[in-house]
Image: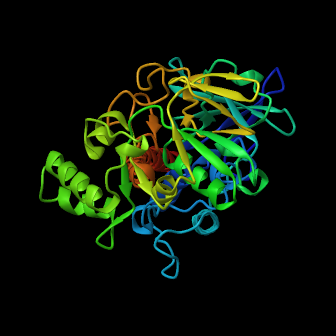
Amino acid sequence: MENLFGLVDHEDFFSRRCIWVNGPVIVGAGPSGLATAACLREEGVPFVVLERADCIASLWQRRTYDRLKLHLPKQFCQLPKHPFPEDFPEYPSKKQFIDYLETYAEKFEINPQFNECVQSARYDETCGFWRVKTVSSTSRNEVEYICRWLVVATGENAECVRPDIEGLSEFKGDLVYASDYKSGQPFKGKKVLVVGCGNSGMELSLDLCNHHASPSMVVRSSVHVLPREIFGLSTFELAVLMLKWLPLWLVDKLLLILTWFILGNIEKYGIKRPSKGPLELKNTKGKTPVLDIGTLEKIRSGDINVVPGIKRFNNRDVELVNGEKLHVDAVVLATGYRSNVPSWLQESEFFSKNGYPKMPFPHGWKGNSGLYAVGFTKRGLSGASSDAVNIAQDIRNVWKQETKQKKQRTTACHRRCISQF
């Protein structure tokens, strides 16, 4: 029978529902999945969005800290077809961004199938369709979606990365992932070790300091730290403007000179810069520079202590690679995220073992046999939006052509029936 979504619904011998989708299946209801769904809606192509959580943008709603704001100006973070409200600040807050996404989903009538965890997805060469098997996290019911196109929108931040450090599992203090950290309030008066020096690690260290904790931040490798704004412009916006006229290597040089004038020499605080420039490193390795929003000031004042890599944990003591030992009450792991695509997608031509498309930007959005990827560009929300537009247009071209052919066949058949009558 046909259900409310215009999908054909069947039961098989093992009581697994089989649903035929007359359009693509989108796995993930984060910003990438929502952007793709909105673009498909505008093109008139039906779709189904599968989401393992019980809400859209679960990473933003459930796994981010309270003080989080967009690191880039809102014009670089808006999704296709719908700009941010004019009264939003240049750097919207977590709550404002979630409100924007909720409004976005409502505007484009995006109603994901929540609590549907994808167990596997494979292309069936016999019939020429994708088979996407899910299990409900609430009822444990199994469903198999059968579709012509599969859009992977689970993103770069699907799972936390747990570092392999000797003794970490036996640490006796509080151990918190950045995804579970909300505020520094519970750590007031405590000595906290923050493992990781990316944007999250830097900002959590600042938040801990503002809540009167004593944070030490682990800086194991080199990292670019840039001011969030230069001459009243966002650093990102300035870089984009310069790249229109200047080669990348020269823009990198200029950014580092301007950064030195604004932030000074940060190497004396234990933060070394990579040999490659920030934009070159972003393009070649996908490593995002840190945009400083006040952390360096706390480092200079001594309120945030910078330490080298960790050798091992021993009860509540931490031995560093330089031989120094620290006694800490808590550890916050800001060690990043990873893709979970290899755990469920049974495909090896388009995606690599690390869960990212093999082809570099801007060619990593389209695979073979109707497989697409959105939000894996390592270029934030603007990269996801670009993917979404490309994917929707590509699917539309095929979908509308096939729909037209079906109508022509139906009309021809109808005419033959009338003439015979």
Task: Identify the residue at image location x=37%, y=38%.
Answer: 286
Q: Horizontal and vertical percent for residue 50?
A: 66, 43
Q: Is residue 206 above or below residue 391?
A: below
Q: Is residue 293 above or below residue 33?
A: below
Q: Horizontal and vertical percent for residue 22?
A: 57, 43
Task: Identify the residue at image location x=37%, y=44%.
Answer: 268
Residue 388 or residue 63, whichever sits in front: 63
Rendered-image quadrant of the N terminus: top right
Q: Quadrant of residue 385?
A: bottom left
Residue 37 or residue 96, whichever sits in front: 96
Q: Quadrant of residue 109?
A: bottom right
- Furthest-bottom residue in this view: 87
Q: Horizontal and vertical percent for residue 329?
A: 75, 39
Residue 71 or residue 276, whichever sits in front: 276
Q: Could you tell whether 206 is left or right of 398 in the image? A: right
Task: Identify the residue at image location x=82%, y=21%.
Answer: 14
Q: Could you tell whether 115 is left or right of 112 in the image? A: right
